[in-house]
Amino acid sequence: MLEHLELFFKSIFIDNMVFAVFLGMCSYLAVSKKVSTAVGLGAAVIFVLGVTVPLNWLLDKYLLQDGALVWLGPEYADYNLGFLSFILFIATIATMVQLVEIVVEKFSPSLYNSLGIFLPLIAVNCAILGGSLFMQTREIPNLGLALNYGVSSGIGWFLAILAIAAIREKIRYSNVPAPLRGLGITFIITGLMGIGFQSFGGMLTGDNEPPEPTEATTAKADSKEEEKEIKKEIEDEKRTVSYNDVINK
Amino acid sequence: MALLSKKDANLILDPLADNNPITIQVLGICSALAITAELKASVVMALSVLFVLGVGNVVISLLRNVIPSKIRIIVQLVVVATLVIIVDQVLKAFAYELSKTLSVFVGLIITNCIIMGRFEAFALGNGPWKSFLDGIGNALGYGVILVIVGFFRELLGSGTLFGIPVLGDPVTKTGLYSIGYENNGFMIIPPAALIVVGIIIWVQRSRNRTLIEEA
């Protein structure tokens, strides 16, 4: 139970798909202009990640890993099909997305209308393939944890796109320098949010690992102070934005 | 250039600046940001994309009349995945350390939107030679941004370029460090890449005001 909780919070906050490893940035930037569409895409990502990561885990365990084919008989124990993982993972993802699209269209037209246009986008969303590849490199031990990892990474991505969409809706009222408008300011805000998310880094380490007095930690401490300042700035910004909003209304 | 007509040359030159895949078309950001803390990794990544996009564009362009349009996405994914497997295996064989640094990001070239974007937008409608030039051009445009970001992050963050110290030694205080210069640890952490790209966009759009977006 504890390891499930740990993985859950770790994948949402510490290894957040967008802020820690920059996966799914293309759709994150393209579809974050309005909160409602961002919610639709985010929900679709949670769903597809939750389906494909466990499936690819099974593929990895029983087909791709070194010696995974041993269930066919002892003479297959030496085979390592690891080099095929990219092509099999992406095939699974593309097929699943297609399948989900067909099923959803058949059984829930209303859900299809709100989710449907995003599904083809998702097949080439790096967050999905990235989820499976990280699942493989981090050697997640069992199917339950793989499902957990898929869903919680999806939730992390959902939170990120929701937050940026809300900020972008508000930032329209601010006076951004013209060359920075649109893409530029979105990059910089995402960077600042990423710095904020870095502060979750110490959340699960507790006091089991004594910090080593190296240059790296002192640098970290410095950057943490910076983070706090920046966070404060963001909060201040948010406050002034909502204040402006009230005035506009 | 006698080899290329003016139109062909534009296929290569346009993506380098005014139609840059990263800063203007907003494609392929994912891998661009995560691996740019070192210049070496950036260069290898740029070369890998150059290979995959150049060859992939030609293959798709040759197949363009045979692929049924309904399943074209899957065909494209298979072509990219095959090329990426080649790149991955070559890296693992000849540059194992580096392939560890790049970890899953080599695999993520498959879903790099630049590649699918160029297949869809160009290779499906043009001949192999033009597609090849377009692929090379876009991969170079992508590589330029990667190298710029990698250059600044490694220089300001660790004071090195390609792992060679260029600003002096921070421990024995030689070179720039003797007058009190410090490495900026902030540049090493991942979010700094976003801010550097944001600044590149800012500079580019200030110089060419036609690119400014409507709010």
Image (cartoon, coloured by chain):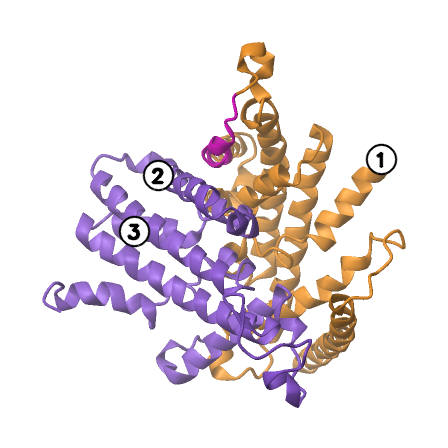
Chain colours: A orange, B purple
Question: Between residues A227 and B210, which one lies in front from this camera angle?
Answer: A227
Q: Position of residue A163 (x, y in %)?
A: 66, 62
Which region is colored magenta? A79-94
Pointer 1 residue = A1
Q: Residues within 10 Å of mark 1 (few under 14, many from 20)?
A: few
Q: Label 1: chain?
A: A
SS class of the residue under badge 3?
helix
Q: Amino acid at mark 1?
A: Met
Of badges 3 and 1, the one in the foreground is 3
| Element under disc 1 | loop
State which quadrant residue A61 falls in: top right
**Judging from the image, what secondary structure is the residue with disc 2 in?**
helix
- Amino acid type at circle 3 is Gly
Q: Residue at x 71, y 31 (%)?
A: A141
For residue B79, the mark is 2
- Residue B78 is inside the magenta segment: no
Residue in the foreground of this view, choosing between B7 and A37: B7
Q: Chain of mark 2?
A: B
Locate the C terminus of chain A by quadrant: bottom right
Q: Which of the 4 image quarters holds residue B94?
A: top left
Q: Camera-side residue: A98 or B155?
A: B155
Q: Are marks 2 and 3 on the same chain?
A: yes
Q: State the CA–CA distance, disc 3 to disc 1.
A: 48 Å
x 22%, y 49%: residue: B125
Which residue bears the numbered disc 3?
B54
Residues packed near mark 2 inside 10 Å, few (<14), some (14 to 19) or many (20 plus):
some
Left or right: residue B47 compared with residue A187: left
Image coordinates of residue A171 in percent, x first then y, are: 60, 75
Of all residues shown, which one is farthest toward the right? A207
